[in-house]
Image (cartoon, rainbow, N blue to C red):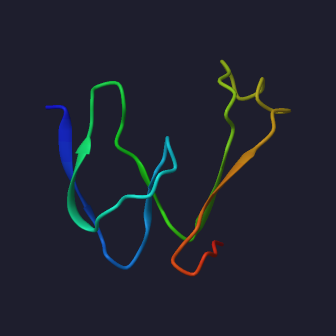
């Protein structure tokens, strides 16, 4: 299978985690899901932090910067 059906509730905007492009429809949507990519989505109105530099250990990541990913909701805000 190279696609999966994902349910997106209508009360929120959803973003593709990798491309940050919003999902065009709500309800059940067929999403591409090749073996090399996990279908992962962010709900609008949220802020997540991540470290984008791949390392072999957490101690090597201690000084690495954080990246903030801000997914805006319908009112153009996030918390």
All told, the count of numbered labels is: 0
Residue 41 vs 43, above or below: the answer is above
> Residue 12 at what x, y percent from top left?
41, 74
Q: Residue furthest front?
A: 24
Look at 40% across and 47% down and name the residue there. Answer: 40
Residue 61 vs 50, above or below: the answer is above
> Residue 57 at what x, y percent from top left?
68, 22
Say which quadrant the N terminus sits in: top left
Q: Residue furthest top?
A: 56
Say which quadrant the C terminus sits in: bottom right
- Compare residues 50 and 45 and report the one nearer the observer: 45
Look at 77% across and 27% down and name the residue there. Answer: 59
Q: Residue furthest right?
A: 63
Look at 86% across and 32% down and name the residue there. Answer: 63
> Residue 71 at what x, y percent from top left?
57, 62
> Residue 16 at what x, y percent from top left?
44, 49
Look at 49% across and 41% down and name the residue there. Answer: 18
The answer to whether residue 48 is left or right of residue 74 is right
- Compare residues 33 and 54 and report the one nearer the observer: 33
């Amino acid at each position: 299978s190279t696609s999966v059906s994902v349910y997106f509730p209508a009360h929120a905007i959803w973003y593709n985690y990798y491309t940050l492009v919003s999902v065009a429809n709500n309800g059940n949507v067929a999403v591409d899901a090749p073996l090399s990519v996990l279908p992962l989505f962010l709900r609008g109105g949220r802020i997540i932090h991540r470290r984008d530099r791949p390392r072999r250990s957490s101690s090597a990541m201690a000084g690495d910067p954080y990246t903030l990913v801000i997914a805006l909701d319908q009112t153009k805000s996030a918390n």
